[in-house]
Structure formats: structure tokens, C-alpha cells
Amino acid sequence: MRAWLQCDRCDATYPLHEVRYRCECGWLLDVTHELEGMRGVVSRETFDARHIELAGPRTSPKHSSGVWRYTELVLPVEDEEIVSRPEGNTPSYHHERLSEWVGLDEFCVKHEGENPTGSFKDRGMTVGVTQARALGARAVACASTGNTSASLAAYAAMAGLPALVFIPAGHIAYGKLSQALAYGARTFQIEGDFDDAMGLVQRVCEELDIFLLNSMNPFRLEGQKTIVFELLQSRGWVPPQWIVFPAGNLGNTAAFGKALHELHVLGLIDTIPRLVAVQAEGANPFYLGFMGGFRERVAVRAETIATAIRIGAPVSYWRAVRALRWTDGLVMQVSDQEIMDAKAQVDAAGIGCEPASAAAVAGVRKLVAEAVMDRSDSVVAILTGHLLKDPQSTVDYHSGDTSSSLKATYANRPIPIEASVDAVRRSLEGWL
Ligand SMILES: Cc1ncc(COP(=O)(O)O)c(C=O)c1O
Ligand SMILES: [Zn+2]
């Protein structure tokens, strides 16, 4: 299996072991696999034959990880080189009431929040940190709205690599901050937002010779492609009509498009699902770009309750545009109110997710209401992060925190009560 780094704008190529994220022309690089040579060698059966096994000291990551099962299409490496928790093998849920709420008969959510550190980032990080170690990196770093830092900190600790994380002070959810600190990353809280942190970390990595592990790093995207691989494999390689997901820095948008393109070229799927990238109204540069026909790269100053996607100048902008062209995709926006109401529905189904993830579900509901999707369409939404990542937003919503301008449409208010059976009985009248 051959792979190299390639520029999609000028076609320049670079070896896989060169530390470089951008082409000489300035464009972000992709890991390109020699798909021609793989045809007939890599098939649906190749992946189906790798049964899931519980991780033990000698278990091959190709059997325990939902990322490394697809190693030929991710990164050709030996088992011993891999840093894995293991990640992936995430469940898909169908819930009648949730399907009814969005207005679809066949609606599924694939829960990437059920990865080892509670978000989809683990899929990219296992590949990024594996590559960092193979390259002999002396340290790794990222800017983050929270989940990337949690994941990087964990995988770097597993690999014995020092990790630096740059986060916007006051704008990251508590669960995520606690993870970065607990896993031992050197955690820099900077004045400014994610976009400022992103600018800083690029300069730090360049000047201090540190391996950058944001999703502009092409190895991260190779891991994130496996969300789509696994989703399709779990459906017997029968694609849904739509895949819907929240979009911030646009790494997933780029990765999902690349995944579908490669599977189609290899003949593993016959049809290509349409991608829908959902942004928060207050952090919507990609939506504005889409509405303007992508004539230019749009940036905004971002504000939303969904801190994970509070990003105004997404790094993977152009490769996300390419993903939409490959998949006849759409971009849409939803309000913070729609996000929190969708979250309450996902949570009350017993599934649970963090606010950014719920943007995907809010997006589906809106597309059904606007008749872009038909009731009978098959739709999968990707839940990107775990409910416990951001407990504050959940408690504020349910307790009707008056400092928030949001309505608690589906509030489940805590009930202050005297400690007696009688008081409980009275409270339950008309409820049970
Ligand atoms: C929970 C969650 N959802 C969505 C996103 C956005 O993903 P992307 O940056 O790939 O667009 C992030 C990014 O931090 C995230 O943490
Ligand atoms: Zn180039």
C-alpha cells in the first residue's frame, strides 16, 4: 500500500514522513492513497473479516480499534507502532420518540461521544499521535475548543509524549478542561477565542519544532474518515441517503467527503450519501460561504452556546467545499434555542450528547420541516461529543437559569421537596 502527501491545488507531492501540513503553494495537504493498486486487494470482505475483539496486551489494533480496522485506507503501519485506546466501534441508536420528533421514519444517530475520551477526536488522534511517534516528534500541540485538547492529552500521555494545548480562556466546557489538566497536558489559557489560539499554535509549532495536531494535520483526517467507513460497514455497505453532522473547523466535513470519495472509487459503495454540515447561527462562516456559492472564504467573529463549534475562521474551509462538491452536500444553520431543544430531546431519549452534537439533530428536524428531506428518507446524524462534556449547559437549561436568554422548552426541573413519603406521593399525583 502506497501513500504520500499531496496538494489538491497544484498536485505537488511530498513523502509521508516529511513534517509538513501545507504545500509550498500554501494549500493544506492530503494523505493520498494509491487507490488504483488497492482495487481488488481491499474489499468489503477485508474489513468484514476483522472481527471486533476486546483489547488485551497482544490484541492487534486491527481487531480492537474501529480506526485501525481500515488501516489500508488510513495509514499503512505495523501494529507495534500504533498508539490506540482503542477507539471507534461506536454504537448507532434508533429511538422512536426521537425519530418522531425530527419527523422521519428511519432516523439513526451514531454516537461518537462514546469514544474513549468522549468525542470523535479520538479517531483522528490515534492516527496523529501514531504518526508523531513514528516521526520522532519531541512534543505535540493543538489549539482547541476543548475536545481536541482532551483527546490529544490522553493519547500523548499513552505515547509518553509531552503535550501543549491552547484554549480560549472562559470558553471551554468544564468536562473538557478537566480532562486536559488530568491527562497532564501543559494547558495554556489564552486571552482571545479559538481562532486566536489556532493562529498562535501554528507559530509555536513552527518556531519550537513541535508536531501540530489540529485537524489541519492531514493524518487527523485519515482517522476521522473511519466514522463514515464504520457507519457504512455497520449497514452492510448500504449507504443512507443523508449524513448530517455539526461543523466548526470543518475537519469532519473534509474527512467525510474524502472517505466517501475513496469508497466510491474503490467500488465499495455504489451511491454517495449527501453530506449536511450544520453550523450554529452565531458561528456560521461556512453557511455564509455556501449561500454565496463559495466564491470566497468567509470568516466571522463566533458566538454560540455550543462552545465546541464556536469557530469563526475554519481551517479546512476549501477541502470542506471539495467534500460538498463530491457529495452534492448542503450547509445549514440552526439557532442556539434549536440546538438546546434538540439536545433535550436526544438526552431524554436516554442517549445524551453535548450541545454541538445536537446541532446535527436540530438540522435534520429543520430539513424535514422545509421538505428538503422526505419522511421516508434514510438519515444518520453523527453525535460528536458526550453529554458529560458540558454538564453546565444541561443544568442551566433544565433549571431554567434566568441569566440565559434561552427558553427551557423541554425542561425537567429539579424538585425541592421535604424528606417525607407523603411529600413524594403528593408530588407524583397526576404524573405516574
Ligand atoms: C463535539 C464537537 N462537535 C463538532 C465539532 C466540529 O468538528 P469540525 O471541527 O471537524 O468541524 C467539534 C470540534 O471541536 C466538537 O468538539
Ligand atoms: Zn500546492
Image: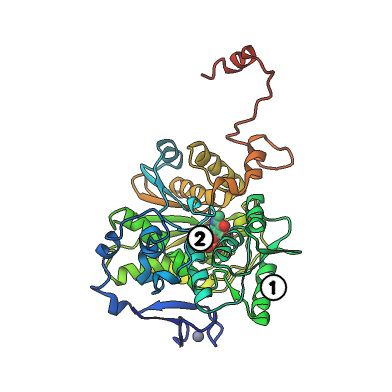
For residue 66, what is the image quadrant? bottom left
Amino acid type, label 1: Leu
Mark 1 element type:
helix
Amino acid type, label 2: Asp
For residue 195, what is the image quadrant? bottom right
Q: Which residue is mark 1?
A: 200
Q: Residue furthest front?
A: 57
Q: Which residue is mark 2?
A: 122
Looking at the image, can residue 232 be seen? Answer: yes
What is the C-alpha distance between the residues marked 2 and 1? 23 Å
Instruction: State the residue at coordinates (48%, 38%).
Output: 350
Instruction: State the residue at coordinates (59%, 14%).
Output: 425
Q: Residue furthest left?
A: 40
Category of crowding for the residue at label 2, using alpha-carbon neighbours closer than 10 angstroms: few (below 14), some (14–19), many (at least 20): many
Whether residue 133 sits left or right of residue 165 in the image: it is left
Across and down, in percent, residue 96 comes to 40, 37
Across and down, in percent, residue 422 comes to 63, 11
Q: Nearer the viewer, residue 12 or 403?
A: 12
Category of crowding for the residue at label 1, using alpha-carbon neighbours closer than 10 angstroms: few (below 14), some (14–19), many (at least 20): some
